[in-house]
Amino acid sequence: MGQVPRCNRQRNFRGREAVAEFCLFLAVVGYPTGKGWAASKPDLGANVLIFNPSMPAAAIQEQINKVYSIQQNSQFGSARNALLFLPGAYKVDVPVGYYTQILGLGASPDKVHITGNVHSDATLPRNNATCTFWKAAEGLSVTPTGGTMKWAVSQAVPFRRMHIRGDIVLHQDGGWASGGWMSDALIDGNVASGPQQQWISRNTEWGGWTGANWNMVFVGAVNAPEGAWPKLAITKVAQTPIVREKPFLQVDAKGNYSVRVPSLRTNSSGVSWRAGSTPGKDIPISRFHIARPDVDTAATINAQLAEGKNLLFTPGIYNLHDTIKVTRANTVVLGLGFATLLVNNGVAAMSTADVDGVIIAGLLFDAGPVNSPVLLEVGPDGSKARHAGNPISLHDVFFRVGGAAVGRASVNLRVNSSDTIVDHTWIWRADHGVNQSVGWKVNTSANGLVVNGNDVTVYGLFVEHHQEYQVVWNGNGGRVYFYQCEIPYDPPDQPSYTSAPGTNGWAAYKVADNVTSHEGWGLGVYSVFRNKGVALTRAFEVPDNPRVKFHDLITVCIGANGEISNVINNTGGATTPNVRLTPKVTEFP
């Protein structure tokens, strides 16, 4: 299996000149939309391209290529883009670069059909996709060139509401990749995961699945692969207990734009759109404040929220000097093109009241140089209300501390409201970056996720490199379906990485001693210690209670240093360097 360290090199960064060039090209290149699409076309700004099937294929391809020329290697760049396809048929090739969302605007994926390809390519030598982040493909059907679509990705890459009329591979020519997400997707042929280290598929359907490496999780998947833990690294949960699919922008036959808010699903399997569209309600675009990074501040956004508006963030970086406060029940906050909320003076980027039905989706929360106590807080401290019938939900919410610039945050995501659903998140303290933005005392972050609410459910939990507990779970009734975690690479020595006398490091997943019920399925913790003499005593630290249960856990030591001495509490045994031993625990207790 060999060493598979996450990339730690600076990638190509073209900076302000590239952004200026991109905005200029958008300003001068364009084609009129057909009459049928003009009824309520919103102004989504210069970073959104909207294609319609009457446009010449060569003209569409030219614009796609120009976006990709900027975003292909811009891992820490400032450009943000969304490429939107109106319903119809297209013959184009769509390479997806960093900070780029490809989105079909139909009520179902089959309303937008691309013959050609939509593909994500590895960005490191030797076909290595372990640094392929912040890309999205949603709401499309694709007939891939040659019959197979390539989707070589790692963290923070949503793949939702997709119909692939052929096969798909989740790697590039056998190169490494470090985990990904697929939901509400139909693959007519086979999915080949190859050397993908870990993966979660939720509410998916396919002809077949091949491959299993360290931690592959299938929740509500029709035709899940054969095999089971520990012989194969496959975890299967037949039904998704409760979920709401991510809201999406759509256009009807008269050209009216709206946001579809899917209904809550319980005990489900397979895709939501088999009957033609996802059950739910439509909110006209007129009921959204369309935020622009060159215009809006926290004050202007909060004023719109106070007037009862929902929020649609267009692509870009929003420099915030105050907290965006979501207080009204059923407010929808939706980002396009990895819209990024960057905090500058130690405040939280966003908070919600403890109310029903708030939805936050498609945003990247970026820490600033002054320490923020929290980046996103769901419900205030001490929240007591219950929301089981209409829960708060988070979808494709991503967090970053360092990498593009110096960032500091004590906690990235804190969930105080009970019954909250988290549907895919990557909570990352950067292990590599640009502008001297990474270091043990530079990009500081104690915890990735802290859960204080009861009956919180998380699908696709990716949390990495924080300096104390990666996850702290204080509420009862929590459920986690898939966990992927690399503990910090950079503790300088053991004294700097010691949580208590005789305990090396901080567990990657801590369930508080007073918790009486909790459950997790398919969880992996990996170490890549850069310095000698550093170890972690245990990956998971949980109370001794028969109702605190875990299924299918693995630890892996990547590289030549250190170990994880036990998987969970004092059970499971130690890893050894260079992936020579990967301890597994099937059931605990």
Image (cartoon, rainbow, N blue to C red):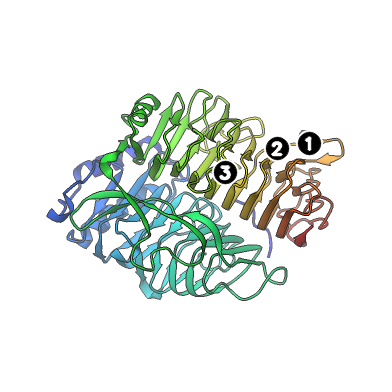
Residue bearing the label numbered 2: 468
Rendering coords of residue 29 (x, y %): 20, 47
Q: Are marks 3 and 1 in contact (CB under 8 Å)?
A: no
Q: Is residue 231 left or right of residue 90?
A: right
Q: Nearer the viewer, residue 216 or 175?
A: 216
Task: State the mark number for residue 499.
Answer: 1
Q: Tag 1, which secondary structure?
A: strand
Rendering coords of residue 503 (x, y %): 83, 40
Q: Is residue 23 above or below residue 273?
A: above
Task: State the mark number for residue 227.
Answer: none
Q: Tag 3, which secondary structure?
A: strand
Residue 422 visible in the displayed image: yes
Judged from this view, the residue extending furthest toward the right is 502
Rendering coords of residue 540 (x, y %): 74, 49
Residue bearing the label numbered 3: 427
Q: Amino acid at mark 3?
A: Ile
